[in-house]
Amino acid sequence: MRLGRLACGGAALLALTALTLIPARAFSARNDIALVVHKSNPMSDISSAELRRIFLGDETRWSTNDRITILLLPPGTEEREMFLHSVLKMSDDDFVRHWISLVFQGEASAGPKTASSAASMTKLVAGLPAAVGVLGAADVPSGDSGLKVLRIDGKAPGEDGYRLRR
Amino acid sequence: MPRRVRLIAVVLLAAIQVSWVHRAALAADSDAPEDMTSTTMNIGKTPFQVQGFGNVDWIVSPYKGQQSGWENGAFDLFITSHLDEHWSVLSELVFEPSGNEISTDLERFEFVYEYSDAFKIAAGRVHNPFLQWPITYHHGLFMQIPIQRPIMARWEDEPGLWPMHFVGLLAQGRLFGALGLNYAFGVGNGRGTSLEVVQVGSDANNNKAITASLGVSPDALQGFEVHGSTYVDRIPADTTLEENDYAVSSSFVRGPVDLRGEWSQMQHKDQAHSITYTTQGWYVLGAYRLPIHGVTLRPYVLVEGINAPGDETFLGNPADETAWAAGGRWDVSRWVALKAQYRSDKIEGIERTGEVRAQLAVNF
């Protein structure tokens, strides 16, 4: 009887742990936007300020001095709109116009690139050592896909306080 | 149309045709990333990008004493070639109306070596970083919100009073940190014997002009920038003039808000006659994107003025001028803008007069 109560208590505790931790983590990560780079990129954490500078074209090279290639999903996708609004406080039109202006000023040699889908994005980032891409955290392939997910201000997708959350 | 201009036009049209074909090829390959801002062509081994800017204005109700009608704006062809990780070439070729003829001007032609974000150096004909307006919008009126440039940001051949083009070496860079420091420093030929001359081929004196600017865009104030700059030259006019100019500019561009302003003082010292001519210019532009879903409409107001020495012959005896313009810019699409404004000008000695003007500006 005592043993049965103990077993029931243990099972309840396990169930509670599974319900509160695992699904919650999976749920929030599914709603997060991830910043991915090539796995050889030495960077693992990026500050919000640096992220903004990169996507505004103020900072165009990694610490290795390789020129950064920015990849985004097509206009109209939720990930793109949310990222631009949350990080840059810009609409998509403002963002494109900003980059046309940078190219025109001679400040940038080319604008960000558009990947046609999340699958295409992961393939491109895995093949371009200096690329950085923005996609849904749920679309990041598991295992060794050649990608690395960057932490932003010390937080990874799914963690409390992660700033790119839908 | 002169034969040379015709030849250039044919070559450029052929290049644009190739660009369209290439764009179609890119679209067909779903995994090829598409550049947001333009299309890259691979001709030979040096990929280059072509962009065009153009505008047509309709003067609905002209200034007193002038006629209403249509004004063909400049056709601005912007070509860049990114040669490798560090080297690039940038050119801006403008076909613009001169009276009722079309003239061609190579406005910018620079070879750039970029070592890092902190240091790059350009050689050739560049836009002078002394004022921020010309290096933000250059010759493409599509890029700017109002229809016309402020008086102090007019090009030498319009004619403007400030030194806008610069032939020589220009170093620039950004130094990262909380302050977001950026700088520009250039040495070049400087002004020519008259106001509209940009010394592309040779320098009329051994003195070189120096231009320098320092800017700050702090991380803590996203969208805010402030710049200070100076320009020093010895002008080989009929009487040699020592030029010392200063400028301060500031802008705040964030979300729907676009605020910018500049002030500059230009001093020309005629040492032979112990006369110093001082010209001041300023402008303030405010624009706000209205919160209408699916429509990008920006009302704007531009207020400006110059205070000029009417007796300086090198500047063409300019008169004091104040003006304001109020209008709106509607971005019909990402590449097409319609603008309309009322502008009121007061030039010293002439009664205040106004103009209603509309503009179709395109980026292609």
Image (tube, coloured by chain):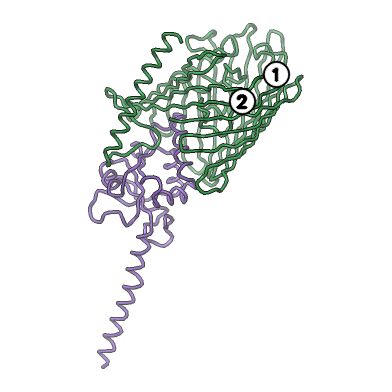
Chain colours: A purple, B green
Q: Secondary structure at mark 2?
A: strand
Quarter-of-image position of residue A31: bottom left
Looking at the image, residue B195 sits to the left or right of residue B167; the answer is right
Q: Are marks 2 and 1 in contact (CB under 8 Å)?
A: no
Q: Which mark is residue B346?
A: none
Against B285, residue A115 (above or below) is: below
Instruction: Please state which amino acid type lies under the numbered disc 1.
Output: Gly
Judge by depth and name the residue closer to the eye, A148 or B257.
B257
> To which residue does mark 2 refer?
B59
Sequence-wise, the earlier of marks 2 and 1 is 2
> To which residue does mark 1 refer?
B65
* Residue B102: image location, x then y, percent: 50, 14
Chain letter belonging to callout 2:
B
Looking at the image, residue A34 sits to the left or right of residue B218; the answer is left
Against B284, residue A164 (above or below) is: below
Q: Residue at x 41, y 33 (%)?
A: A108
* Residue A131: image location, x then y, percent: 32, 42
Judge by depth and name the residue closer to the eye, B349 or A4.
B349
Number of residues whose C-alpha sits closer than 10 Å to that of mark 1, classed few (under 14), some (14–19) or many (20 or more): few
Q: Residue at x 38, y 57 (%)?
A: A32
* Residue B60: image location, x then y, percent: 63, 27
